[in-house]
Amino acid sequence: SAKVHRLLEVKRNIDEPKTIDDYTVLVHELDGLKVEIIDGM
């Protein structure tokens, strides 16, 4: 749902980002929903 998608926040740290390191990624929590972070592809 849209509520879940809004929990992920991605912000640019510089004007022209080139790599993932140029971003800040935040994961917010929703009451009753456990956050699971999966690293890798």
Image (cartoon, grey):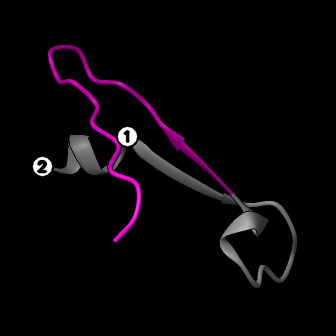
Rendered residue at 32%/50% (across/down): 38
Crowding around mark 1 (Cα neighbors within 10 Å: few <14, some 14 to 19, many 20+) is some
Labelled disc at residue 31: none
What residue sits right under mark 1 in the picture? 7
The amino acid on which the numbered mark 1 sits, given as a three-letter code, is Leu
11 vs 1, left or right, is right
Rendered residue at 66%/57% (across/down): 11
The amino acid on which the numbered mark 2 sits, given as a three-letter code, is Ser
Rendered residue at 17%/24% (across/down): 33
SS category of the residue bearing label 2: loop
Residue 32 percent location from the top left of the image? 15, 15
Can you say which quadrant of the picture contains the C terminus? bottom left
Labelled disc at residue 1: 2
| Dominant secondary structure, magenta | loop
Q: Is residue 33 above or below residue 36?
A: above
1 vs 30, left or right, is left
Counting residues from the start of the chain, the first of labels 2 and 1 encountered is 2
Q: Which residues are magenta?
A: 24-41
Residue 24 percent location from the top left of the image? 68, 52
Q: Residue furthest top?
A: 31
Q: Nearer the viewer, residue 12 or 22?
A: 22
Rendered residue at 21%/24% (across/down): 34
Residue 37 percent location from the top left of the image? 35, 43
Q: CA distance from mark 2 to mark 1?
A: 11 Å
Crowding around mark 2 (Cα neighbors within 10 Å: few <14, some 14 to 19, many 20+) is few
Q: Residue furthest right?
A: 14
